[in-house]
Image (cartoon, rainbow, N blue to C red):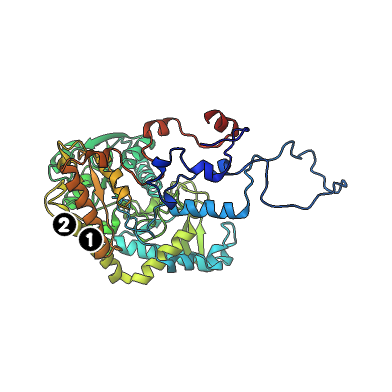
Amino acid sequence: MSMNTQGRPSSPVAMTQPEDHESFSGHRGLDLKEGLIFEIGDTRETGVDFPGFDDDGALDMAGLERSAPPALPGLKEPLVQRHYTRLSQKNYGIDMGLFPLGSCTMKHNPRLNEKLARLPGFLDLHPLQPMGAVQGALELMEELSRWLTELTGMPAVALSPKAGAHGELTGIMAIRAALEARGDARKVVLCPDSAHGTNPATAAFCGYRVKSIPATDAGRVDLPALREALDDSVAAVMITNPNTCGLFERDMIAIAEAVHAAGAFFYCDGANFNAIVGKVRPGDLGVDAMHLNLHKTFSTPHGGGGPGSGPVVFSDRLKDHVPLPYCVRDGEGLRLKEWPDGPDDPAFGRMTAFQGQMGMYVRALAYMLSHGGDGLRQVAEDAVLNANYLLARLKDDLSASFDGPCMHEVLFDDRFLKDSGVTTLDFAKAMIDEGFHPMTMYFPLVVHGAMLVEPTETESKADLDQFVDSLKGLARAAKAGELERFTAAPHSAPLKRLDETRAARHPVLRWQEEQQTAAE
């Protein structure tokens, strides 16, 4: 990097171009490495001319005046515009192409939902407004609750949890409250080996000891092993359905019967509800509590840190322990029940300071109303169809982990890469050169070198075919011994492979000028 005498980049151009012209020849346009805005700008300059300020004593800062200028980079407006535009174009998003992350349901977000969430009556709400001034918002929450209870066959719902893991916590806390109410101090939660990592983490956070339940060779919960593990110490069983192998747990009713016979509760991880919405009601399977990711199944923005929303539905066994707040109707209309009715109120408390994510409620209900009941059923059918289409087209080139049809996601392992010298990570990095975000890697842990792909229902056959052709080409190249294509991938990205262990253990989260100068 070309630096001036102050240890700063001499210009944006000098900063982005490598000194070796030959190594630069393979890069074009947006493939250039983009420096930090601090590296491009100069903290001694400003991009805006301010009029002089005559300090006549009229402005009293009470001793809070700055002692030094802020350490902000000074750039002219075109540089700022181009910098952030280039950065935005380096991001891979669902609006750019297929996003195959398994168990994440990264699908198209209809713009209608976004428009409705930005209506002033919803956008400008304040959580402390009087109930009489927010009747429309409360009615929306009541209607959303009605849809969620109808779709799941469960009589009660808590809207306030803000993510899937937060919903899991809510469900397990409700189960703990129900056990405490009957004076039953149970200490164990059972989780399958293929469970989402948040399941055992949630149970442990709530003070439970976690026991693993093995999977069968068919990728499903081992029912005899589960029955053997059930005794009067078990508080709950946490099962994802469809599971993280992309398979439907066929023994759900038998599992529920065994769990209830042991006096325990049945928690279902609803992260994969996209595969069964409108087709299967979890309440009919004997589920007691289940979280629903509005930011997955019902097409609100997913990723980037939020905002999310993870309502939890409850069975008759747990409906008295729904956390506050929730909507109730009385003679004056709708209101939020925000406080217990007394010391004997079975509700265990509240999970958030206020009522939850109103923007997510609007988007989710807009999605439901747009599709209707039959449209939501088609969502599940098309998601499962797309995943099985990928399985059918890729099974001869990649190695499917399990026989038979899958649900909304298809799981491959690394057997097709045997003796090639190519790993799952290498294969995923090479996908970047093909223009695709990698699929979920090395998860679930029950499959060696796992590659979990979820196409969702919003991808067209043409997009799926393009994706399949790229994966077929990569698989054949790996088997043909084109090792360098994979081990050095990605070739076309601005940044190559990072030391991911070092980045995780020693992240650099803020820019400091003296550190940058020393590094250079």
* Image-quadrant location for residue 64: top right
Which residue ends up furthest to the right in the rendered image?
56
Looking at the image, can residue 410 be seen?
no
Task: Pick the residue in front: 118 or 65.
Answer: 65
Percent of width and height locating residue 491: 33, 44
Residue at disc 2, secondary structure: helix
- Residue 207, how many percent across, how many down? 37, 34
Residue 110 circle label? none
* Above-or-below relation of 19 to 349: above
Identify which amino acid the numbered label 2 is placed on. Answer: Arg
Residue hosting label 1: 465
Q: Quadrant of residue 514?
A: top right
- x, y (%) of residue 263? 25, 43
Percent position of residue 244, x then y? 25, 47
Task: Say which mark, if any, is on residue 393.
Answer: 2
Q: Nearer the viewer, residue 285 or 304?
A: 304
Q: Which residue is at a point 52% across and 29% down the rendered structure image?
A: 519
Q: Residues within 10 Å of mark 2 (few under 14, many from 20)?
A: some
Give the farthest residue toward the front: 22
Residue at (34%, 38%) from the top-left corner? 203
Q: Are marks 1 and 2 in contact (CB under 8 Å)?
A: yes
How many residues crowd around disc 1 within 10 Å: few (fewer than 14), some, or many (20 or more)?
A: some
Left or right relative to 305: residue 485: left
The answer to whether residue 263 shows anywhere in this view is yes
Q: Nearer the viewer, residue 502 or 123?
A: 502
Secondary structure at numbered mark 1: helix
**Marks 1 and 2, the one that precedes in the sequence:** 2
